[in-house]
Image (cartoon, rainbow, N blue to C red):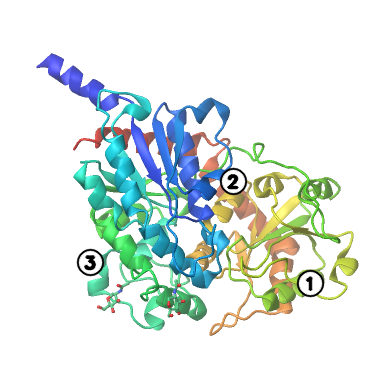
Amino acid sequence: MAGDQQQEEARRAAPLHVVVFPWLAFGHLIPFLELSKRLAARGHAVTFVSTPMNIARLPPVPEGLSGQVRMVALPLPAVDGLPEGAESTADVPQEKVELLKAAFDGLAAPFANFLAAACAGGREQAGFGRRPDWVVLDFAHHWLCPIAEQHQVPCAMFLIFTATATAYTGSRRQNVSHPRVTVEDFMPMPRWFPSPPSLAFRRHEAAWLAAATQLNASGVADTERLWRTEERCRLLVVRSCPEVEQPRVFPLLQELYSKPVLPAGLLLPEDGRCESDGDRAEGSGVVARSGALQWLDEQPPGSVLYVALGSEAPVTPASVHELAAGLELSGARFLWALRAPSAAAAGTPPLPDGFEARTRGRGAVCAGWVPQVRVLAHAAVGAFLTHCGWGSVAESLRFGHPLVMLPFITDQGLIARMMAERGVGVEVARRDDDGWFGRDDVAEAVRRVMVGEEGKTLARNAKRLRESVVGDDSGRQELYVDELVQCLQRHRFT
Ligand SMILES: *[C@@H]1O[C@H](CO)[C@@H](O)[C@H](O)[C@H]1NC(C)=O
Ligand SMILES: *[C@@H]1O[C@H](CO)[C@@H](O)[C@H](O)[C@H]1NC(C)=O
């Protein structure tokens, strides 16, 4: 008996082979890669599944871990209307993301072939020869669990959204008792949420959410994808931690989804040193990307507002114009990572005439890619104007920056309200019905964060939140990954 037990324990403690498969968006690919690196660093084998172009564009896995992470590229099937070579949401305008989902659904058969081959290995083997212990998948893979079940490989869903947004969505069961149909239905947090009333979506954000639940070209709406996948997963893993959200949200999620829900921690990249910082001259009048850091070197400590709205926020040329005028009005020093508003519109949007001349010396505009973590880590940066994507807010939290917040879609509005509730940021005021904002709204929010007593309080709160989330090093966050790994090991055969 004792021998059997020992054998059983050894079987459970054996290193895992985990297949991870993110949705085709860099906001998903990167956190899945960060999770993969952490599993690899703990001695587990990770097979990372994506498409060729996405794998080619991922940052390299550090040399010490590269033997533990294997990339598997499944070619993306062609779909009418989807531009050739488009493999991620960054490659298509918002209205074609649905076609990308249709193409993505075509990966079911290639994935089934891959998994069948991977399952030819035994459970006694190690590394990539080992039959996978888990598939860690994303919200969009409604066809994957049935394939994994055929091979008795359990699935875990890794959600890159906040726990609060996941609780807002709820499971299919909650939609029966609490259906959302109209835009108004989508505005408040549901009654099961231990809410401060300030946590709610604005009308224009709710309108976007209501539209996103409609059927589209792929035939399966996002919420339906999430539910169909979640229902067959053994556990949910959330890229967050109780310190940064209401602690009660994690137990609430277990109730709502009727299964274990584990925080993975924020999975922040090491410290930005691995981000490449090469030179690439961009158009005239803008600084090349390594120039961003050089420019920061010349600015006083804590004086610069870093401005970045992510790569996929639906920013119109008109809002770029108002943002520029607002930055100018505010009088603040700023470094603006300005990207083309969407893949459809080539080039960066036009700035107001004479903008760069008038802000020269105190403002810099960088076209193209900016090493965001290195910029946020720079001593000259004192605050962050952000679209409130969870990845950006988490990166910023780690350096304790107060936020000027300009959310657009998905869960960004909810994140902005969470951060306002924590006293670490101020939102740019927007018109409720259509979300319009003007230069004065931008200037006012920037001034509130960058100068005066309110600014000092926000900065203090942001430092305090940083303390409670990351502490003196990232060790605290790593404990969440340790617990996740233990859970994956314990439950792999049950
Ligand atoms: C939730 O339920 C309502 C009412 O049955 C339905 O109209 C709606 O489509 C459901 N929501 C989703 C996302 O399926
Ligand atoms: C889905 O289609 C509707 C109606 O055509 C559109 O308004 C909405 O923006 C689309 N949603 C997404 C997420 O593409």
Report which residue position mark 1 lands on: 351
The residue that disc 3 covers is 173
Task: Report the front residue among 241 and 20.
Answer: 20
- Displayed quadrant of residue 252: bottom left
One can see residue 66 in this view: yes
Q: Nearer the viewer, mark 1 or mark 2?
A: 1
**Nearest to N terminus: mark 1 or mark 2:** 1
Q: Which residue is mark 2?
A: 398
Find the distance from the CA under tag 2 to the CA under tag 3. 36 Å
Q: Secondary structure at mark 1?
A: loop
Q: Nearer the viewer, residue 468 or 276?
A: 276
For image coordinates 49% across by 42% down, the residue present is 33
Residue 493 at x, y = what percent? Answer: 21, 35
Q: Whole-Å distance between the Cαs marked 3 and 1?
A: 48 Å
Q: Quadrant of residue 125?
A: top left
Secondary-structure class at tag 3: helix
The quarter of the picture where the C terminus appears is top left
First in residue order: circle 3 vs circle 1? 3
- Tell me whether the residue at label 1 lies in contact with that at label 2, contact meaning CB atoms closer than 8 angstroms: no
